[in-house]
Image (cartoon, helix red, strand yellow):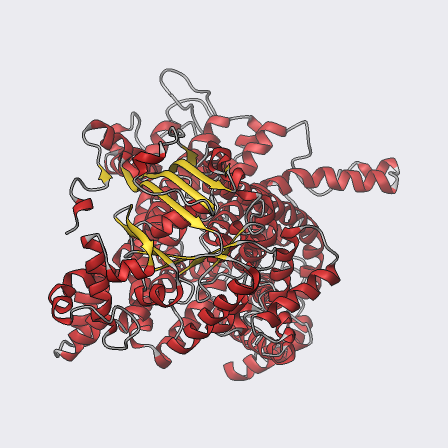
Amino acid sequence: MRWGSYLARRLLGALVTVWVAATVNFFLFRLLPGDYVSNFARVPGATKAFQEQLRAEFGLDKSLGGQYVTYLWQLLHGNLGYSYQYKTGVSGKILDLLANTVPMVGLSTIIAILIGTLLGFLAAWRKGTPTDGATVLVALVVFALPVQWMGMMLVLWFTGVLPTSGISDPYMEMMNPTLWETVADYLRHMILPSITLLLSTAGSYVLLVRTAVLDTFGEDYVLTARAKGLSKFTILRRHIAPNAMLPTITVIALTLGTVVGGAVLVETVFSWPGIGWGTYQAINNRDYPLLQGIFLVMTVSVIVLNLLADLLYFRLDPRIRK
Amino acid sequence: MADTTAGTSPVKKTVGARRVLALAKENAGLIVGVALLVVFGAVALFAGVFAPYPADTTVGDLFGAPSAEHWLGLDDGGQDVFSQLLYGTQQSMLIGLAAALVSGVVGMVVGVTAGYFGGWVEGVLMRITDYVIVIPFIPLAIVVATIHGASLSATILIIGMLLWANTARVVRAPVLSLRHRLFVARARGMGAGHGRVLVRHILPQVLPLIISSSVLAIATAIFADTAMSFLGLGIPGGSSWGQMIDIAFRRGATTQGAWWAIVPPGLCVGVVVLACSLVGRHVERVLNPRLAVSYMNPGDFTVGPTPEPKPVATTGKHEADDAVLRVRDLDVVFSLPAGEEFHALHSVDLDIRRGRKLGIVGESGSGKTTLLMSLLGLSAPNATVSGRIELGGEDMLAGGAEGFRKHLWRDIAWIPQGAMNAFNPVRTMEWQLVEAVRRAGPVSSAEAKQRAGDLFERVGIPRSRLKRYPHEFSGGMKQRAAIAMALAARPTILLADEATTALDAMVQAQILELLESLAEEMGLTIVFVTHDLGLVGDFCDEAAVVYQGRIVEMGSVVDLYHRPQNDYTRELFNAAAWSRGADGSTAQDTDQDTAQGTAPEAEKAVQ
């Protein structure tokens, strides 16, 4: 299959899935008691005029089908409705929250993938030895512990040593910090949440990579490579790694989508004002429009990451492109 | 059947306590996992009996530290943490088991239905499954909990309905392949309805898979409950471990430094999830034997003690002066699970003479592949290899695996079976040939590519195919490419392992012709391992017959065919003549009547 047609087909498939997700999202939240506007009436400061504007915007006076069409139309224009809590547009709020989440989650994910790959290879390489046993056990244990609990344990241990709450020091601004001081403060706040998230994901990456590598060990071409008299490290680097990474990429992309969801617990523990913390606040304040928007963004991010994994796979595995 | 085989089975068994110990060690994960689950199950059942204090009752100071009366201290409400933990065990285990049951049943029904009926049913069901897998868990929990009201049953249902998709995915594939199996078709043919076939023939086969994925679902369910509880979507007034963690967080146990209110519930979740993973991993290992095959292990084989060279007189054979590869007293013993041993090769002596073509024949499991692998120094890590394997007078075995490595491809090259997955699937043929060319010494990239192209042309593949990937080659082409690759570092000895077995007769003949002309042109010594006697007759000068780990007879092909000395050799030839019929390629002088008389048994042996 050619790159162009492959790309087109995958893009189309992803678009269909996004549409399904948006539709489910629409109907799921319609199941909740009350409509947007009557819920909004409970919010202080929501004027009659504003309520009318909303009604028009989302076609709440129309039939369910009409509302659905309006919803999709507004969605195409990036309008996800208005947040009860923040009294601003949901899209803008989500972007603000994402701007805080992405660096923290991104950093910890990159490190987790690096650690997972390294330790996974090491464990497979030393299969059956104490090194392997210890690596697998540690991976299984961190995988088994609830992430919010690990976060709380880190708070217990590091209170007073590292910042355990928020994204920046509130007193910092008064002291006219330099750019470097601001960045350093931001990074210091990032340490504990990142480590917690790292712990919760790296374990499964280690196990995943280890299994993929062990699977590859049994392939005939590995025996060929050994018969060639190549050193084991060369075989690992040239023959095993490129093949073992194929299944790993797909699964890691799948889990990456859920990392954003997993960030809910971590961001809550450390009051990191990102999309996860936003979710927690929205639940507690029953801010359904914001929740609905976040739900959609999370689903779409899973779909996009899957698409990226497919495209990467196409690039890496010649057997797909014929 | 043959004189050499009289005696005991080659597998040495161990008995008694040592065996039990060895078995326990191999299944340690399963044993520990099940034991932990049983303990937690018992605690859950008898929580009320064990708990020193009643549930949800203030019995001391808020956040009181652990003491003799309160082993794990007191929580924010002055409740005994240890007692709460026991009640929590009850609720968490209930949620875990019930949700796993829901997900197991739904996943089984969806997976089996999709796999069994296929077609559009499968299409629709798997689309739904794919979607459920990407649904973010938390928002769904919020919606359901809000509409339904949070309760024990709501929690179980939400979690169960999210987890079934994994089970369905895992179950579908094996059902799909079972559907096409003979016994299912036969049952259908005998008039069994779909329901009967599913229950009697399909379900028992996939049940272990369902159970293992359900055990993992217990873990995920307990996990999911901790997440839901933490977001305030748990069971109102509930006491699960997740709720304990949530309450500790909300009431500031972290700022109070009340570690005793935080540590125990988290550890309990950890231990149960760990136990489930241990069980699940064990089942996976049993079900996925692929993981057991490994050509790359941390250890190399063990070199056994080198025996004293035997005086020539006692070997009963003449020493060939022109032997390029000389094997003496080669013993290979594999250590097996549970302390057993398998003696695969017994004091094998073999002279591989310069410029000759030697066939090594034997049935599957006779030890011929073990012999070949030991000549390459690629015996498995559980093997102990002793004896001498001399290349030009140098005992390679004395140096262990490293002793062989410097000779591999430069002096001894291996021709894998082309039908195997012998080429790296994600690299071009050129890349793989260049790698082989460079085993002879460093050359420039252009030079190496030039040589790879020359090799391809020599074996009859157009140079332009170098840029292609292995999957774009036919079986015969791949076999030619394998030969080209084997020649890349100018070896003198080629070891071919069933190199033509999977090819059709025409291609097989072409490959043999190619090997023959190459051998002549380059003065190669070829060792041809095969179970195909006709091939040995056509192609080889000499043959060694391997049976139950011993070379029972060796000599020129002519001698072996016309004057076999060993009963087994005779039977092997008879069987071959019988199975090949009157194509005239082998053993024309065999008495057909005798052949048919002995055939069934010997044929079984060949398989």
Choose between B285 and B548: the one closer to the eye.
B548
Side of A114 where B499 appears, left or right: left
Q: x%, y% of residue B420?
A: 44, 63
Identify which residue is drawn at 17% across, 50% down: B2
- Tell whether B88 sits left or right of A138: left
The x, y position of residue B160, in whole percent, is 36, 57
* B428 displayed left or right of B199: right
Left or right placement of residue B40 versus residue B465 in this view: left
Question: Does B429 appear above or below B336?
Answer: below
Whether residue B289 is visible here, answered yes or no, is: yes
Relative to residue A216, is residue A75 depicted above or below? below
Seen from the viewer's position, the closer of residues B38 and B312 is B312
Which residue is at 44% across, 67% downward? B419
**Residue A152 location, quadrant:** top right
Q: Quadrant of residue B580?
A: bottom left
Residue drawn at x 54%, y 38% as measured from the top left: B402
| Residue closest to the far top | B68
Relative depth, front residue between B370 and B572? B572
Quadrant in which the C terminus of chain B appears: bottom left
